Image: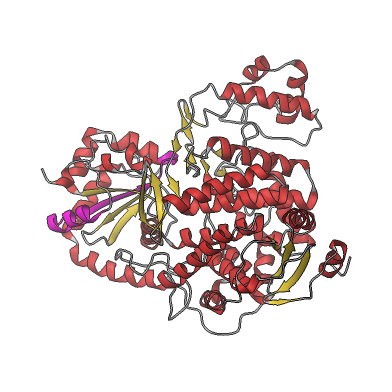
Amino acid sequence: MPDFLSNRLAGETSPYLQQHKDNPVAWQPWDDAALSAARASGRPILLSIGYAACHWCHVMAHESFEDEATAAVMNELFVNIKVDREERPDLDQIYQSAHQLLTGKSGGWPLTMFLTPAGEPFFGGTYFPESQRYNLPAFVDVCRRVDDFYRTHRDEIGKQNESLRAALEQTLPHGGEGELSAVPLDAARAALLQSLDRERGGFGDAPKFPQPAMLSFLLACGDEEANDAALLTLTRMAEGGVFDQIGGGFFRYSVDARWEIPHFEKMLYDNALLLPLYAEAWRRTRQASYRRAVVATSAWLMHEMQSPAGGYYSSLDADSEGGEGAHYVWQRDEIGALLAPPEWAAAAAAWELDRPPNFENRAWHLHRTPAPVHEEDLEAACDKLLQARGRRPRPGRDEKILTAWNALAIAGMARAARLCERPAWLASARRALEFLRVNLWCDGRLLASWKDGRATLPAYLDDHAFLLAALLEMLQAGYRPGDLDWAIETADALLERFEDKTAGGFYFTAHDHESLIHRPKSGYDSAMPAGNGVAAMALLRLGHLLGEPRYLDAARRTLAIFASQLAHPASASLLGALAEHMSPPTTVLLRGPLAEVEQWRLRLTREWSGLALALPNGVPLPPALAKPESARVNAWVCSGVNCLPPVGDFDELMRVMFPAR
């Protein structure tokens, strides 16, 4: 039997692929063997892309991929390839873009694409049901029609593929070498404020996504209106059901405009990106709800998502035994039976348990109201409910460890630790960083994914950019020369392996990556910040710290190539880099005895969350950071590579930094 007629997923490390290893479908991983089989047999490829925590991926699997009759049709007509979008974001980007160009509709997961044996897409969709409903055709009928079309319209498919390749090329940025200006910053700010839901926070209507890159941009704008817009959104999210009021951590998004009922999967990257925003919001306001969100989310990351080896796992499933959300929703009588009368009084007021059920008209999903309650009683109620919930069937956990997502979590934990003065959070981040260094940094090259003792797949732009940003955060939380050395190596790898030396910017895949039908170079944020935006920001900061023009020039050229799209709010990560390019960031270098330097760093962080490095006596420094040792702390305030004379008194430092106070 040819390999492509048997299921080959048993040897894969991806939990998502492992979910499909016993399907009667002859699933193949995306590899040379599967692609060669398609070319040799002349069969088209049925490409299915999803991920382990995806609800509709599970639905389609149960309805179609576990069905013998459906599998028989798939095996007869196609070479069937299953891809984990989290392991292969390159393939996901390409074929999501192709889906949108072919159908005129946004994609999603599961993504179902039909390709020629050469990998060129000619038809696609997302979820297809097992029988006709939701205005969608039955999946088996789709398979048969696609096969017939492929056999009878080869010339038409060939012409469509030429047009599609040209259209994909048009998605690449075509900027120029003109002068950059601050105009896009004002335009994007205005657009975000225009789309703000001024009652409930967030942008636009349901479904509502957290949009951390946009919130970060607003917090950095420096004016009261933008600041208030971001804080409104953070407040409403922390009050809503999109935040797990019992166990901490944020769900993927809200299906309604009130942030009340979420889609129940929990992703590492969402929480990694929201954590430092809530830490900054707490630093600015000292509002208790922000601190609670930071503390609970950090605890969730450490207790639920950090592996014994140190790395952070990828996600928790939306589904558990009983269906989507079953692990999280409650019956009112169940809550009442668990709580003492004062606890019940606090819980009923805080969570609106006196109102009708809000989840499918049959259960309560908890969200916080502004009603005043006795917080100690509510905290006791949360503890009891968390213990009871722990006895329920748990959602599945995707335990692969992704470099990019771990880097986001390391940066988020390190920043939250610095702003909230929580050493345990920094220790957690250090464990994860050390895991990446030992397991995914191999002979000077970064790998993308780790599971069951195996590191696999060459790393992408996001892995390198997010790791560089994480290392810069770690340096601010506690300077270690090895972290700076690794940051330099990572920055050099970005320039060597991903930079477009001709036009500027960074490709998503490395120069020696496998040849695919398209090579993306995107500057738009999605659920995660754009790799080009994060790379530009990190290179600017490292370039100013070290006085390294190669990094500064690469960042400037990245901003220039994306200049035409910078005014769009979806370019928030690039906009942050543009702001720092237009006005080089202030950096504070602290040099002196270890204990005193740390005290200064803590005091400074309470006043200001910008870039500061505490450099104790005795720590070796590169020439650009080499400030003289002394028996007392000295502080240098620098803009770009230009530093003012040292200051030896903290109050004087505050006057230098904030003359208008």
Horizontal arrangement in the rendering, residue 171 relative to residue 408 (left or right): left
Percent x, y for residue 573? 58, 64
Tell whether position 167 is magenta.
no
Q: Is residue 440 above or below residue 300?
A: below
At 65% from the left and 53% from the top, the residue drawn is 415
Horizontal arrangement in the rendering, residue 616 relative to residue 147 (left or right): right
Please name whichever residue, 302 or 555, is drawn nearer the observer in this view of the structure: 302
At 54% from the left and 35% from the top, the residue drawn is 304
Image quadrant holding the C terminus, namely: bottom right
At 62% from the left and 59% from the top, the residue drawn is 475
Please name whichever residue, 366 or 14, is drawn nearer the observer in this view of the structure: 14
Percent x, y for residue 37? 16, 54
Tell whether position 42 is magenta.
yes
Kindly give the residue lying farthest to the bottom in the view shown: 178
Percent x, y for residue 430? 57, 48
Q: Quadrant of residue 583?
A: bottom right
Please name whichever residue, 1 or 335, is drawn nearer the observer in this view of the structure: 1
The answer to whether residue 200 shows anywhere in this view is no
Please name whichever residue, 252 or 289, is drawn nearer the observer in this view of the structure: 289
Horizontal arrangement in the rendering, residue 165 relative to residue 417 (left or right): left
The answer to whether residue 306 shows anywhere in this view is yes
**Total marks placed:** 0
Kindly give the residue lying farthest to the left in the view shown: 1
Residue range corresponding to the magenta coloring: 31-56
Question: What coloring was used for the rendering?
Answer: secondary structure
Image quadrant holding the N terminus, namely: top left
At 48% from the left and 32% from the top, the residue drawn is 395
Percent x, y for residue 330? 60, 24
